[in-house]
Amino acid sequence: MRINILLKAITSVLSFLYITNNKIGINSIYPLVMVALTYYFYKNINYEKNIWTRLASVIFGLYGIISIFQVNVYEEQLQRLPVLLMLIKLLVIFFGIYFFVNYSLSWLYKKIDNLELKKNNKYTGKHIFIVSFIFLLIMYLPVWLMEYPSNVSPDTLSQVKQILSGEYINHHPFAHTMWLKALMMFSKDLNIRIGIAALLQMIINALAFSYVSTFIYKKSKSLLLTVISTLFYGLLSFNAFYSITLIKDVTHAVICCLLTVLIIDYFDSEQNRNIKLGLIFIVLVLFCLFRSNGYYACILVFLISLILNIENKEYRLSAVILLSIIVSAIVKGPIYSALGVGNASPAEMLSIPLQQIALTIKNGCYLKENELALLNKVIDVSKVPDAYDVFLSDPIKNLLNEHGNIDYLLNNKFEYLKLWISIGIRNPIVYIRAWVNQISMLFSPYYYSTSIFWEVTPNNIGIVGTPLLINGGLNETLHMLAYKQHNISLIGWFHYQSITTWIMTVSAFYLLRKKNNTTIIVFALYFSVLFTLCISSPYNACFRYFYGVIVCLPLMLLMVLGKDCKENE
């Protein structure tokens, strides 16, 4: 038994050393200390043999494998090894993580089972909402003043140009462009219009997040959870900066929060269920229209909801999800066409395959003459190596859109599908690496990026950064504090989207372990968003693409810890 535990300890230490890229030599005392500590950890924790705890551990093992294939880590850890040693090292990492996570979750889940939150009935929902709203405005307003009129990203600039010209394309969701147009309806001066739009969005975000904190208090009666929620939305700098950045991801995040609240409330109370279903339908349609991957995430949620509802034969929510998918398809298809809204380039959905083939070409891997000929019909292969960006698919997409023949690709899609498969069969490691380099930040905290846009993208339409906070020293200090927040222990962790993935995984499998098949539908929504990013993310630093799930972290905490929510209604 002790030998078994010692082997688990050693594997965990080895995995730790590999994943952290630690170069400590074999003669160092550090690995021995880690073995002793991990041995003690295993010896004093009761191992839980629950299937969901084990499955969660397997998934974390896979997260570790993904992390090892990302750029720089792979070169340091695996590239120089023969295939057999590479496989052995990957197995050591996988099982080391598996055992460590299994024991860790066994301890954590039992702690959560025994945790009893103190209930507090001193305050009303109105009190919580007002205090939270005022606090968030205090935290957000300085950002608006020092970034006036707004943090204008290239995406926002493109949408503003569409609004000014009246020629629309659904590359950035048309629904969000129309929402932006509504926010910009005040004043004739473009700078003021952008500034007011950013201010209105900031207020809407503060209202929505205050409502989330109020909902958490009403459901749990826990002042601790409520305070954590409000501080999460107020203290984390990316929430403040995103609140005044006019991009689709911010609006979609608010929609995701409201959808989570509605679904939780639908399952927690039998009252007014038809009204709740109506509201869920409306918000689901918005969820589908305000981000392209929202539509595909909804399809996955529909399939999962059918499986979860087989036992209780409660199909009303599944029917509403299906109806929202159908309505969204009609809006994005015939209605947008009737309004003259152009379609986005099909290359937007091909980020991962394009990056995989591009890396194959860049690495000088063998390609048959007929494969090269087929590729040259849609893209200039000679320009691919210089265009390829390890984390960003836009250069290759632009090469295809601007200098290629995408129509030929669409007319011969099955030929190119076979081409992609045949090249991948010969170069599986290259394909894995190209894929991991696009999505690894979702699983690994090795790299940092919250994708915050700073100031105004240079433009020729008259949008100019004119800070209202004219104290240069104060402005610079606030910027530095916001930019460096990711270096602060604990609070800085949330600047890594991988931390959200980890928390989401731990929370979801805890609910599965408790056989809570109702709130797990919410997690099905989150994992569906994650899955869509895994198959189509255009950028590794996709924090803003995952922002809709990140802002729901306080609600995940409610679902896991607010176990007695029904009693508090």
Image: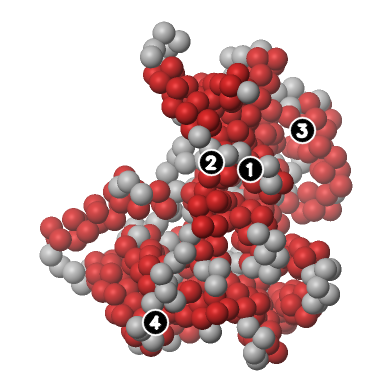
Task: Please state which of the two labelled residues, at mark 3 or mark 2, is closer to the viewer.
Answer: 2
| Image position, residue 88 (x, y; %) | 66, 19
Residue 33 placement, left or right of 505: left
Residue beneath disc 4: 121
Alpha-carbon span between mark 1 and mark 2: 10 Å
- Could you classify mark 1 by the number of other residues whose Cα lies within 10 Å: few (under 14), some (14-19), or many (20 or more)? some
Name which residue type carries label 1: Glu
Residue beneath disc 2: 104
Q: Are marks 3 and 2 in contact (CB under 8 Å)?
A: no
Q: Quadrant of the N terminus?
A: top right
Choose the circle earlier in sequence order: 1 or 4: 1
Instruction: Tell me which residue sits at (56%, 45%) in the image.
Output: 105
Alpha-carbon span between mark 3 and mark 4: 60 Å
Residue 228 placement, left or right of 272: left
Q: Nearer the viewer, residue 278 or 164?
A: 278
Residue beneath disc 1: 48
Q: Nearer the viewer, residue 194 or 226?
A: 226
Choose the circle earlier in sequence order: 1 or 2: 1
Q: Nearer the viewer, residue 287 or 356?
A: 287
Q: Are marks 1 and 4 in contact (CB under 8 Å)?
A: no
Choose the circle earlier in sequence order: 4 or 2: 2
Choose the circle earlier in sequence order: 3 or 2: 2
Task: Please state which of the two labelled residues, at mark 1 or mark 3, is closer to the viewer.
Answer: 1
Q: Circle 1 sits in a helix, a strand or a loop, which is it?
A: loop
Residue beneath disc 3: 424
Name which residue type carries label 3: Gly
Q: Is residue 256 above or below residue 23?
A: below
